Image (cartoon, rainbow, N blue to C red):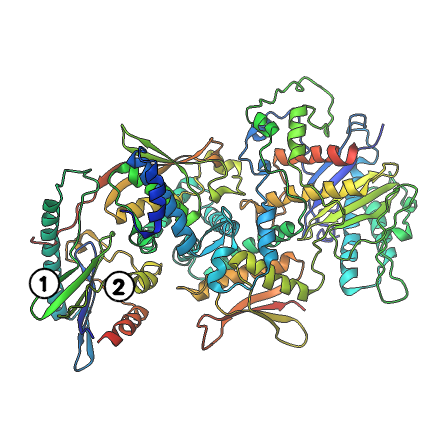
Amino acid sequence: MVKIYSFWIFDRHCNCIYAVEFDTDKKEIQRLTTNSSYMHEKAKLMYGLIFSMSKLTNTYHQKSIDYKETDELFPLETNFKKISTGSYSIHTLKTKTGLIFSLVTDINDQDRMEIELQYIYREIYLKHVTLNPFEYNDYALSESETKGEGFRHIENSNFDKDIYAFIEPLL
Amino acid sequence: MSIPLYFAILHNKTDSALYETFLASKDSLSAEDIPLKDLYPFIANSAIDVIDNIQQANQTNLPYNKTHLHQKVQDLVEANMNSKVEPNKTSFFVENILVKDGSNKSLVQKVTNTHNNPQNINSLPEGSLFLGTIDEYDGYLVSSYVTYNNTKFMVISDKNHVMNYLQLQKFFLNVHDLYLKHLMNPFTSAKGDMPIKSLLFDAKIKVFGDLYLLS
Amino acid sequence: MNNNLFGYEQDQGPKITQLTELNKDSSILNSFNDKNNVNNQSGTLDLESIKNNVDNGTKLSVNAAKKNYEEGHDVSMSAYLFVLLEFIKTIVSDIDNTNHSKILGDIGHDVGIRIYELVNFKLLNPKKSMSTKSALIEKMDNYKYIDNLSHGSTLNISQVPSSEEIYSYISTTTVELEESGVIKNLKHLSFITLLQFIQDTIWKYMFGKKADDIQKINEDDSSYAIIDNDPLIASLVLPAKVNEFICGIIKGVVESANYKCESVNTQILEDKTYNNKSAYIIKLQK
Amino acid sequence: MSSNISSEKTNESSTVSQVDPDYQKEIFLKQLGEHVYQQNMKKINAEFFNVTYGSFVRTLIDFYDSDADKCNEKLKAMGESIGSRLIDDFYSKVTNQIPRCSNLKDLGNTIAYVGFKMYINTVPRVIFDETNRTIKFRFESNANIFNKFVELPDDIKEKKLYYSNIVSGIIKAALAGIALNCDVEFISDTLLDDQYTDIQISNVTRIKDEVPMGQ
């Protein structure tokens, strides 16, 4: 069984809009809220890593295929699916609309957590955030909250409930 | 010179006229010299109660009160038209209107005076939209059709105008189709009692009239 | 003499709509050739499609609702939900956040009036109107209605359009009656038949599946309930608001069927299997 | 690019090998649109959608007491709030079979064949203007399902109310979701007595990906 350490959602303004960390042995959960500065720091680090890695993969991807300058409106881009280090691995899914879902799990040979991330995006996030007109769809309400400076999060109890229900058995 | 038919669409709740016109063939009289020209709306309105009673008769089978109608038309006439028309001329054929016979089964009988309308519909199914000729006033026959939301279509024809019921039903059906398109328009107000001003609606009604009723 | 007895002021007589002189009026010209004018669309009432949908009568489960509508006669549910929820949000937040339930109810009432008449007329199943574009209609497209009657002086207000083209164009877009000549789809004479009609046909027309149950609530048969285990469009984010809209629709249908209805309100019932099971309670006026 | 769904279809069309790839891509998009609509989307009655939309728009117009410009703006703003959500719904329903758009023409075809088909089950004609890089979606008279029963009253017609302006907002916000800034507006509308309903996308520019502060 795979062990999950944490789950993150970043939007296209480089803000972390949802994060939750599981302490597997003590079974207690810590969620990113406005005042938990510790989680904020971690979110910044996490985003920095994902951002630089995806920039790197793009340069290699463009080298691999003789990348001729296509229409500048539709640049050719790809994204990494999984990075693993000695003790853990990070699985990410980047949607075309710029949302990044990522799971930090223990090192395992099971292949990418693609299906789990797709499920979270398509069933849980879509139902509770996208289709809910009373929930923000863009968490950066003003110019000053973009480029990683934003502070708003998904505060939706049903959303939390579904995420835990989904991740609980995987712990 | 035949007398043109009078056709009206009356709103379900306020009974106000949504649309009125005369359907005339080539050789019919022109507008001014139609006798009792301004009595038609009153006849149409007085027939509304007949329709309501026919509808209610099917549901709550109240004994239909014939004198009530007679009295009502009389009040109308006294109220406005006392000079032109003698009230006692109103003749109501008993078999024209719904009769409640002895047994409690309500007998829906719409046999109109046979010599005038060869094709008489003796028993329309209960709840039918087409009500046939429901009323007769001083030589004018009122035939009517009711839509599902109780908007009433009425044709007032002269006694010696031979009315073919199949053609009449086709006419009412097409008018119902047109009325539905008017109702479905989101910009028709909710109450829906504003008169229908669309010129095409008017043109189509006249063509249907000519197609079904006059030829 | 109060006027609501006759629906008009006693001394002026009923309001006579101005009778148009067909031939004199030039603005009739473009509306005649305007194929998009709603009165011109011959095929708009697709009498066939909903007729056999309603007739096939198979018990549809919720996800089987996909197959119910044919090509061109259905849209995706998410499009409907996006628009509905967005309008609800606009009404609640922008237009009037105190009595938005009343506004939603009125809008539903609007929809109910139209649906009741439309679905019934479709079930009247007269022969399908001429919807295939005949040669004549093609010719109509570029037909310029020559107004040669304007010099005629006689005020014959009911003169039928003399031009043969328009006459035959209209006569081809008529609705044909069954040979039997007797109109089949009758009005609902008792409230029970109307209720069954709503449960079966109207629900199928709107949501592609029948409502699950109808119950009489009290003995003096003045209030009834329509139960829907899994209301299709209320199951997502705002069940209460969307149910208010559906209540408006039911009220519109009941009132246009000539029954005086006091109120229609909704109640979410607890249920193990269905979490959005709702009952629409109709109170009739005594 | 080909995936299991259309594998057997593409070999048929590959026999027609001399067909240029653009046309082949168009066929694939068409099939994909139909496939996704049939399989992944729940359905509802088009007339019900039409009547609901109509009643809501009329309430809006009454609220703004038929000020057409305000209504156009409001409908567009509501469309934008829908569009930014719809793009996520679109990608989740289309899963990964959608081919990559490599130029504006592809974008237009994808929106028309897949986007419009998936949501309102109609496919407009796509007119791509090479020189000033605009895409135009052309709806025949009754293809645009929004205005099926609609006939605008005269006062609103003069003030040029675009009845289904919500669609332009949806397209604009949806494209903004995939980092494409553009102007979307109605060029003509059959309800305003034009021949076609045209929606035009113009001056499309790419939105730069945001870089975290200090990078």
Q: Nearer the viewer, mark 2 or mark 1?
A: 2
Query: Mark 2 and mark 1: span between their CA atoms?
Result: 25 Å
For the point 14% across and 38% down, the residue is: A68
- Mark carried by residue A115: 2
Q: Is residue D76 visible?
A: no
Which quadrant: the N terminus of chain A?
bottom left
Which x, y percent locates residue A148? 14, 57
Which x, y percent locates residue B47? 79, 49
**Contact flag, marks 2 and 1 (Cβ < 8 Å):** no
Type of residue at label 1? Answer: Leu
For the point 84% across and 43% down, the residue is: B141
From this view, report whether residue C152 is shown above or below residue B113.
above
* Disc 1: host chain: A
Which quadrant: the C terminus of chain A?
bottom left
From this view, report whether residue A106 is shown above or below residue A142.
below
Q: Earlier in the sequence, mark 2 or mark 1?
A: 1
| Lateral position of residue B95 relative to residue D141, left or right | right
Q: Is residue D54 visible?
A: yes
Residue furthest out toward the front: D15
- Circle 1 crowding by C-alpha within 10 Å: few under 14, some 14–19, many from 20: few
Label 1 belongs to which residue? A45
